[in-house]
Image (spheres, rainbow, N blue to C red):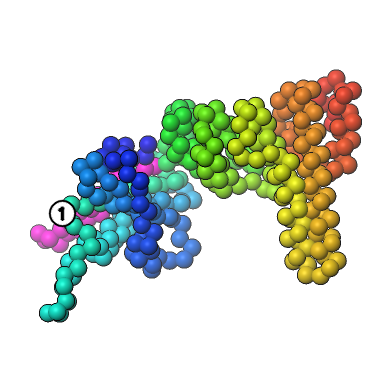
Amino acid sequence: MLAPELHALIDWSVAPLFLDTELQSITADSPNGRRYADKLVKLRRLDQSEAWVLVHVEVESGPQGDKARSYLAQRMFTYFYRIWDRYVRQETGGAESAKVNTLDGLSTSFYSLAILTASSKGPPVVLYRQRLGKCHVSFGFPVVHLRRWEDDRASLVDLAAFNPFAVVVMAQLGAQARCGAQARLVSKIALLRLLYQHRYDRRRVQQLFRIVDWVLSLPHYLEPAFEQAVAAIEVEFNMPYVTSIERMGQARGLKKGLAEGLQRGHKEGRIAGREEGREEGRRDSAAWLLSSMLERRFGQLPVWVTVRITQANTEALHGWALKVLEADRLEDVFE
């Protein structure tokens, strides 16, 4: 999807090998707090030779300018040279030392790919050049400008039917969108629904759910609304791949209560923490029950209802639940 030319050269019947140890050896001096991530992977080409692929992801706060692009080019060239120097170069020691050749430079291919998360346009290939007289070096690598997909969401949705990485890209775009928490909630629910619509199997849904859940993190007060949506989607598609709202809510409430109790470090604190956890579990159960009743009576709930339920306490939830059977309109429940 992001590197189709590379994809066409690889024998995907052979599982990729992630070279985490090798990568650490060439990036050990990277500064703390860096805003980029790297992966080094060994693949098998269709001609049965090896390919080492470096994927470099820049997590930017805005579009990249010429100066930042120049730094990127230098960094990518440095990575390439370090890999070559450490794993390909033949080193000769003293007279009694044997030659060391970890990789065969003639039969091993290298591919560097940079992904810019906040860039929507720019050169598809970036070059690093050095020249002094007749001595010169030139290193080029492809660049993916991830935000260009913002104007082509329909293609991403279609690609997600057979390419799970399209879901990851949509999650990243949603995380970078400058919108409120409520809009992020809507995006997260839509992505989860997409997994079920495209009939992903249990393992793939769970894997992608973990990524989406991490990338599109929500504030605490919106978690119950998301959990309710998860439960509703699982019921709709009859595929309980993630979990049920009751288990999620009760586990979260008990976990928070116990954690806060342990932090207090004394008996009274532990008791109060457990009690608070039980109360939050009761509140979540009441929210789930009210949402289920409303959906059964009035159909799919609008966003403003989800927000009201998410922010309400247990007493208010019980009061609204008593009004459901007598209300003629959804609005009547909350008046």
Assign a secondary structure to mark 1. Answer: loop
Numbered marks: total: 1
Position in image of residue 176 (x %, y %): 53, 44
Q: Does any portion of residue 215 appear in the rendered image?
A: yes
In the image, taking residue 9 as reference, residue 281 lies left or right, namely right
Please check the rendered image and state whether residue 139 is part of the magenta-colored stretch, yes or no.
yes
Position in image of residue 22 (x %, y %): 34, 62
**Disc 1 marks which amino acid?**
Leu
- For disc 1, the marked residue is 106
The answer to which of 142 and 84 lies nearer the viewer is: 84
The answer to which of 163 and 112 lies nearer the viewer is: 163
| Main secondary structure along the magenta-highlighted residues | strand
Q: Residues in magenta?
A: 125-145
Position in image of residue 32 (x %, y %): 47, 66
The answer to which of 109 and 65 lies nearer the viewer is: 109
Rendering quarter of residue 97 = bottom left
